[in-house]
Amino acid sequence: MNNPGLLASAGFTVLPQPVGGPEPVVLWVTEPRRSALKTARALRAANPRCRIVVYGRASNEWRARQVVTVACEESLGALREALAQAIVAKT
């Protein structure tokens, strides 16, 4: 997600990290755009333990990547729970 406002409004502190930076990305939150699939593949190739949370209706192609999905119409509580699930799965 380019705008951390949604995550901040859900009570999270967002520390953006560039993809391909010196540290491996461990959690990535994105929208289900087709263009983001390439990044998802690259993140998983670099770090198979990277957890991906998709905010929006995810296609079968996204779900095949074993991502956590949160539909846009769900509450911020659902987003918090999905992020917590992704974080726990990472450890």
Image: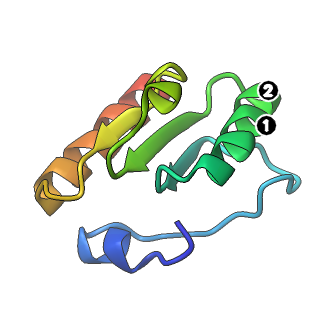
Write down the residue under mark 2: 45
Q: Please say if 31 is above or below 61.
A: below
* Place of residue 24 in the rendered image (x, y in percent of width and height, measured from the top left): 76, 43
**Residue 22 placement (x, y as % from top left):** 88, 53
Alpha carbon distance from label 2 to label 1: 5 Å
Task: Say whether residue 83 is left or right of residue 65.
Answer: left
Determine the residue positioned at 56% across, 73% down.
2
Q: Secondary structure at mark 1?
A: helix
Q: Nearer the viewer, residue 30 or 77?
A: 30
The image quarter in which residue 18 lies: bottom right
Q: Residue at x 47, y 56 (%)?
A: 31
Q: How many marks?
A: 2
**Residues at circles 2 and 1 in contact by the CB criterion of under 8 Å:** yes
Identity of the residue drawn at 53% across and 34% down = 51
Asked which colour scheme the image uses, the reply is rainbow
Mark yes or no: residue 36 visible: yes
Left or right: residue 69 versus residue 39 is left
Q: Which mark is residue 52?
A: none
Q: Secondary structure at mark 2?
A: helix
Report which residue position mark 1 lands on: 42
Q: Is residue 73 above or below residue 91?
A: below
Using the image as rendered, state which of residue 27 and residue 57 is in the foreground.
Answer: 57
Q: Residues within 10 Å of mark 2 (few under 14, many from 20)?
A: few
The answer to whether residue 64 is above or below residue 21 is: above
Q: Amino acid at mark 1?
A: Ala
Q: Amino acid at mark 2?
A: Ala
In the figure, 22 relative to 65: above or below? below
Observer able to see residue 91: no
